[in-house]
Amino acid sequence: MDILHTFFSKLIFRKKSFVKLDSNPEIDWKIIFISTAILVIITIISSVYMFIKIDKGEIFLVKKMGDDKTRTLDISILRETVSYYQNKAIEFERLKSKRVSTVDPSL
């Protein structure tokens, strides 16, 4: 317990200006340490809060579709999408097999 008391008593500022950065690096490091610790604590608290709200379903609600509604698949859009990716695959294979025609700039 004395170790913690000593540690935190050394962190307390000694009647110097908090606003300006002094030539004393110890005070600068105290400012950096305390501000980082505060930011970490705020981040942890907000993360736990968001986790609890999402877990309970209070945030990011999703509209549920009724059981009687079913989604149908549009065959024309499916065929169009499949042909698009097949053409992309063919183009990719063509680019892999084609030799690169660039000139060596060091010559």
Image (tube, grey):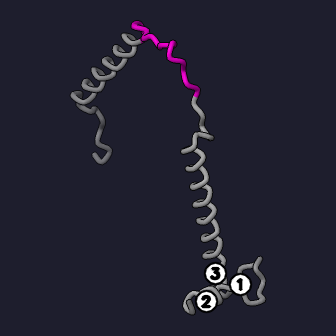
In this rendering, the answer to whether 86 lies above or below 75 is below
For residue 5, which numbered disc appears in the image? 2
Q: Amino acid at mark 3?
A: Lys
Task: Give the Cα distance between marks 3 and 1.
Answer: 12 Å
Residue 107 image position (x, y, % from top left)? 27, 45
Q: Tag 3 or tag 2, which sits nearer the N-term?
A: 2
Q: Kindly report the secondary structure that dominates the magenta region of the rendered protein.
A: loop
The disc placed on residue 93 is none
Q: Is residue 98 left or right of residue 25?
A: left
- Report, in whole angstroms, how far the alpha carbon at label 2 lies from the one at label 1: 25 Å
Residue 30 has which mark? 3
Q: Residue tagged by mark 1?
A: 22
Q: Looking at the picture, does residue 15 appear above or below residue 96?
A: below
Mark 2 vs mark 3, CA separation in Å: 16 Å
Tell me the magenta residue range.
63-77
Horizontal arrangement in the rendering, residue 96 relative to residue 84 (left or right): left
Instruction: Please state which of the two labelled residues, at mark 2 or mark 3, is closer to the viewer.
Output: 2
Amino acid type, label 1: Asp
Q: Are marks 2 and 3 in contact (CB under 8 Å)?
A: no
Indicate the position of residue 59 as horizontal and vertical percent values: 62, 40
Nearest to the observer: residue 95 or residue 41: 41
SS of the residue under disc 2: helix
- Which of disc 1 and disc 2 is earlier in sequence? 2
Residue 100, by quadrant, is top left
Residue neighbourhood size for the residue with mark 1, other residues' Cα within 10 Å, grouped as few (<14), some (14–19), many (≥20): few
Query: Closer to the camera, 103 or 40?
Result: 40
